[in-house]
Image: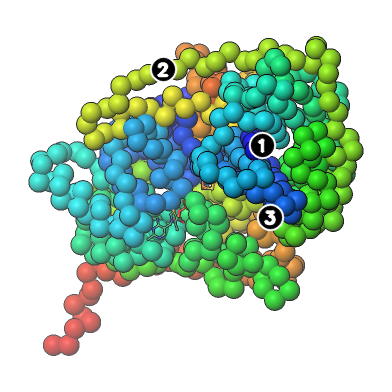
């Protein structure tokens, strides 16, 4: 028998209400394997509210707080303060929000929580649109993607603006730990969850989570789609600890982005020129990431005294 | 007043079917009502929608307990108890099924008919062969067997309300009207599935949600099931690792076991299995 490469314990229960092949469901199943049972999760309005189920039943083996969509960050600051006041020890406080609830509606509360150095983990599961309300574009929807609010017609080509770079916004707050992860790479995701749990301070995870109905692909391909996103360099896996960036899945050659884009209905209108433009953007991003990794010295290392006037 | 219950799966168009029926009835000069059951609208999940048609103002609101017709867009849903519950004496069960399927679970004292709405939809380029959009074809069949609306009104409702491929959808409704087959042979009735035992659990008293979602059986979402050929299994546990529904467990020796009651049939396990020992096979 092959050795188990991730913990056996399940904190996601079957019978939940995610679509077949749901990336966010698999991502949270793996996430909780890494975070363990002494976790409390705050969930704002999103697909995950529905997946977790309605009172009195729950799909999660950990306590859940239902939160308004704009206040995930504030709610986990409050949960941490309450846990400390009650003297609860070894508790991991987690916020679990979609990309709409993070990149757009909850950005202020996220920034506040990071700036206050709240001892909690904010997790953004990114299915690249407001899915629970029927596929509306969010700030995290990529350039060119079809959604119901970025239609494709004679005069429109899907989303006209590029994806909001939430990770850079987060890193500007200098969190204790931040990482990207993808459920198509379970060992990497679980390892990052375990690492995030062990660190203290404000932590952030950006999870890449394919959504079959929202992206228009067959549910069976959900894991393949996640793999391609990373293998093409579109969603690189890395972590940032104390400002030091480290790529956790390295490729000497990337797959062409066309292999990823062509398998999703939301990109079916793209012309070869538009695919080339995405390709160029992805390569720019990958090279930039390699450069940031090479500049090992983080921006907030103790500055050299010689920079000061005397 | 005539009352119709539509049973389908997310993505098949059951809710639109109920709306189109109501609009056609309105064009016939009747007073209609239509609405979906409020539940999870996930692809593959069972969806119920209702329509009422009357010549008088309709005072009732709420779901339909005693329908005159049950329209089954996915016959796999007849595997589960409750599909035809409350159907009136002499009422209709109309099932989307290929001509080769001649028998369905149905209560006694009702009338049964089937139409190959999936084939009609594919013939008219509605949806894809794996997810045909069957609602207009089956509405044509319903108009024929129950006379609840005229074919003419149905076609006009489709022309007015269906944004994509209105002509193809009208043609599909006509084909459904022509091709529907009443099944009068007593052998076409199969016994009903046994009622699901109800587990009454006390509500928790505290603020915590103490009941597990495991009570919710999501098997009804599935139209394909994974079949694992254990003789070729290398015990790599990929199927277990990647299942979003926690529907595969590992036995003491590390062999996978399918948890039938919860698998939604997404097909991920079959896709990720390196030696390809898992096949997705049709249910029922
Ligand atoms: C203030 C507010 N506005 C709108 C909504 C409606 N709403 C519920 S879920 C949801 C979608 C959230 O999208 P996202 O955060 O991307 O998560 P996903 O649904 O994609 O999982 C919206 C807009 C709400 N609950 N509260
Ligand atoms: S819409 Fe997408 S993210 Fe939401 S439950 Fe379905 S697959 Fe998951
Ligand atoms: S098809 Fe396979 S991966 Fe999908 S829910 Fe069923 S067991 Fe899990």
Q: Secondary structure at mark 3?
A: helix
**B246 shown above or below A28:** above
| Nearest to the observer: residue A196 or residue B154 | B154
The location of residue A196, given as percent across then percent down, is 31, 47
Q: Are marks 2 and 3 on the same chain?
A: no
Could you say which quadrant of the image residue B175 lies in? top right
Q: Quadrant of the C terminus of chain A?
A: bottom left
Q: Label 2 belongs to which residue? A: B199
| Nearest to the observer: residue A297 or residue A192 | A192
Pointer 3 chain: A
- From mark 1 to mark 2, how far is it between C-alphas? 34 Å
- Residue at 48% of width from left, 45% of height from top? A24
Q: Is B7 on the left-hand or right-hand side of A40?
A: right
- From mark 1 to mark 3, how far is it between C-alphas? 40 Å
Q: Label 1 belongs to which residue? A: B2
**B101 shown above or below A172:** above
Closest to the camera, between mark 2 and mark 3, is 2
Q: Secondary structure at mark 1?
A: strand
Q: Residue furthest bottom?
A: A310
- Residue at 79% of width from left, 51% of height from top? B153
| CB under 8 Å between discs 2 and 3 | no
């Amino acid at each position: 028998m092959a050795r188990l490469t991730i913990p056996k314990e399940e904190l996601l229960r079957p019978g939940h209400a995610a679509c077949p092949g749901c990336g966010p469901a698999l991502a949270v199943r793996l996430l909780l394997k890494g975070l363990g049972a002494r976790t409390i999760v705050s969930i704002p309005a999103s697909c995950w509210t529905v997946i977790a189920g309605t009172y009195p039943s729950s799909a999660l083996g950990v306590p859940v707080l239902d939160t308004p969509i704009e206040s995930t960050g504030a709610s986990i600051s409050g949960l941490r303060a309450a846990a400390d006041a009650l003297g609860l020890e070894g508790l991991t406080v987690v916020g679990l929000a979609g990309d709409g609830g993070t990149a757009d509606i909850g950005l202020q509360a996220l920034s506040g929580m990071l700036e206050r150095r709240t001892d909690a983990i904010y997790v953004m599961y990114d299915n690249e649109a407001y899915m629970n309300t029927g596929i509306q574009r969010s700030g995290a929807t990529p350039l060119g993607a079809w959604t119901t609010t970025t239609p494709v017609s004679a005069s429109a080509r899907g989303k006209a603006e590029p994806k909001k770079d939430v990770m850079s916004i987060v890193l500007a707050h200098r969190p204790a730990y931040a990482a990207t992860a993808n459920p198509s790479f379970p060992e990497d995701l679980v390892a990052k969850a375990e690492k995030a749990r062990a660190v203290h301070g404000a932590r952030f995870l950006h999870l890449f989570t394919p959504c079959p109905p929202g992206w228009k692909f067959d549910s069976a391909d959900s894991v393949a789609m996640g793999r391609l996103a990373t293998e093409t360099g579109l969603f690189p896996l890395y972590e940032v600890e104390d400002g030091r960036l480290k790529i956790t899945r390295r490729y000497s050659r990337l797959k062409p982005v066309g292999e990823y884009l062509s398998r999703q209905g939301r990109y079916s209108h793209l012309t070869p020129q538009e695919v080339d433009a995405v390709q160029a953007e992805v390569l720019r991003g990958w090279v930039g990431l390699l450069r940031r990794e090479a500049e090992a010295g983080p921006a907030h290392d103790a500055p050299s005294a010689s920079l000061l006037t005397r | 007043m005539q009352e119709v219950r539509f049973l389908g799966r997310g993505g098949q168009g059951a809710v639109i079917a109920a709306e189109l029926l109501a609009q056609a009835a309105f064009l016939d000069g009747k007073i209609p009502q239509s609405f979906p059951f409020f539940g999870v609208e996930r692809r593959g999940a069972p969806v119920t929608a209702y329509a009422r048609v009357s010549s008088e103002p309709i005072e009732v609101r709420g779901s339909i307990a005693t329908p005159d017709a049950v329209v089954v867009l996915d016959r796999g849903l007849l595997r589960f108890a409750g599909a035809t519950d409350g159907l009136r004496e002499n009422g209709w069960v109309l099932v989307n099924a290929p001509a080769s399927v001649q028998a369905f679970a149905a209560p006694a004292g009702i009338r049964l008919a089937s139409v190959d709405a999936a084939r009609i939809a594919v013939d008219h380029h509605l949806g894809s062969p794996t997810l045909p959009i069957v609602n207009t074809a089956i509405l044509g069949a319903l108009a024929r067997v129950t006379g609840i609306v005229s074919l003419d009104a149905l076609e006009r409702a489709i022309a007015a309300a269906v944004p994509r491929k209105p002509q193809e959808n009208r043609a599909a409704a006509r084909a459904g009207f022509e091709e529907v087959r009443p099944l009068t042979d007593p052998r076409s009735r199969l016994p009903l599935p046994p009622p699901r035992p109800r587990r009454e659990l006390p509500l928790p008293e505290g603020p915590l949600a103490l009941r597990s979602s495991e009570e919710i059986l999501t098997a009804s979402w599935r139209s394909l099931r994974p079949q694992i050929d254990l003789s070729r299994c290398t015990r790599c546990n990929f199927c277990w690792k990647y299942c979003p529904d926690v529907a595969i467990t590992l036995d003491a020796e590390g062999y996978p076991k399918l948890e039938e009651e919860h698998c939604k049939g997404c097909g991920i396990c079959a896709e990720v299995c390196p030696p390809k020992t898992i096949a997705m096979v049709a249910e029922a």
